[in-house]
Amino acid sequence: MGDAQLDYLFHHIFLPIQLPQRSDSHNGQGDQALVDALLESIDAFRGGNDHAYYQQWSTIQRSLRTFGRLHSKSKSLSRTSLETAFRDAANGEIIILHIALQNSALLIQKKQIGYVVETFETSPQSADVLAAQGALQWDFPSRAVVIPFHKFEDYSFRDELATFLEKASVEPVKQYTATTLKAGSNAYESRDTTFPAIIGQLLITILEVPGRKLTPTLTRKR
């Protein structure tokens, strides 16, 4: 492991006071190093003397390995890899998707009630941060929907969902990014985090048609 990857682990695990004022992912190598470190820790926990939670650790391990495969080469997602992950998902396994260009993440989990899809905003809007009185309070997930087994496991549905996510991961939508006024006209200039409407609003609303809205247990981040 190189110095750049070690610095990334230090910054993202220990959260020191002085953090890089720029992206330090090194084209995904930092994220992969973090996933590899987590997998090593999971192997250590799972191989301990207490086997009471062996199945739970195995599920987490499968979820992280799937995440590593889906995000191994770049920030873009592959339709083929997504279809494979959807098809091979085991009970309880969580498919973790980071759609960086849309400032969004998705968790897709196969449960007894169906496939639960949860959406997250990955970075807050500057206006929300500045308006917060004290620490910013942030609830997760933003929205959730449950899709019946027969619908999610239909090939055409999985193919359309995978295609949507692949395009969303490579095509920024300037309508939802900050603009600045220059020479009397609006010019595109990335100054704020993207509003996560494509995933958090459009996609979830589409998924509510074959599925139904779900009220999840919220986690509050302070």
Image (tube, grey):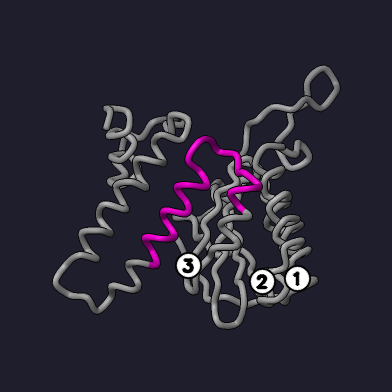
Residues at circles 1 and 2 in contact by the CB criterion of under 8 Å: yes
In-image side of 202 versus 136 (left or right): right
Q: Residue at x 63, y 48 (%)?
A: 80
Q: Residue at x 77, y 72 (%)?
A: 210
Tell me the residue that label 2 is attached to: 145
**Above-or-below relation of 67 to 206:** above
Local secondary structure at mark 3: loop
Q: Residue at x 61, y 66 (%)?
A: 117
As drawn, the residue found furthest toward the top would be 183
Tag 3: amino acid: Glu
Q: Which residue is disc 3 drawn over?
A: 93
Q: Earlier in the sequence, mark 1 or mark 2?
A: 2
Specify the amino acid type for callout 2: Val
Which residue in the rendered view is the most extreme toward the right? 184
The answer to whether residue 131 shows anywhere in this view is no
Percent across and percent down for residue 79 are: 66, 47
- Asked whether 70 falls inside the magenta stretch, the response is yes
- Mark earlier in primary sequence (3, 1): 3
Residue 88 at x, y percent in the picture = 54, 63
Quarter of the N terminus within the rendering? top left
Disc 1, SS:
loop
Residue contact at pointers 3 and 1, CB within 8 angstroms: no
Q: Marks 1 and 2, Cα distance to the nearest angstrom?
A: 6 Å
Please tell me which of labels 2 and 3 falls first in the chain.
Answer: 3
Question: Secondary structure of the magenta portion, mostly?
Answer: helix
**Magenta region:** 59-82
- Please, what is the three-letter code of the amino acid marked with disc 1? Glu
179 or 218: nearer the eye?
Answer: 218
Residue linked to disc 1: 208
In the image, taking residue 84 as reference, residue 221 lies left or right, namely: left
Q: Quadrant of residue 49?
A: bottom left
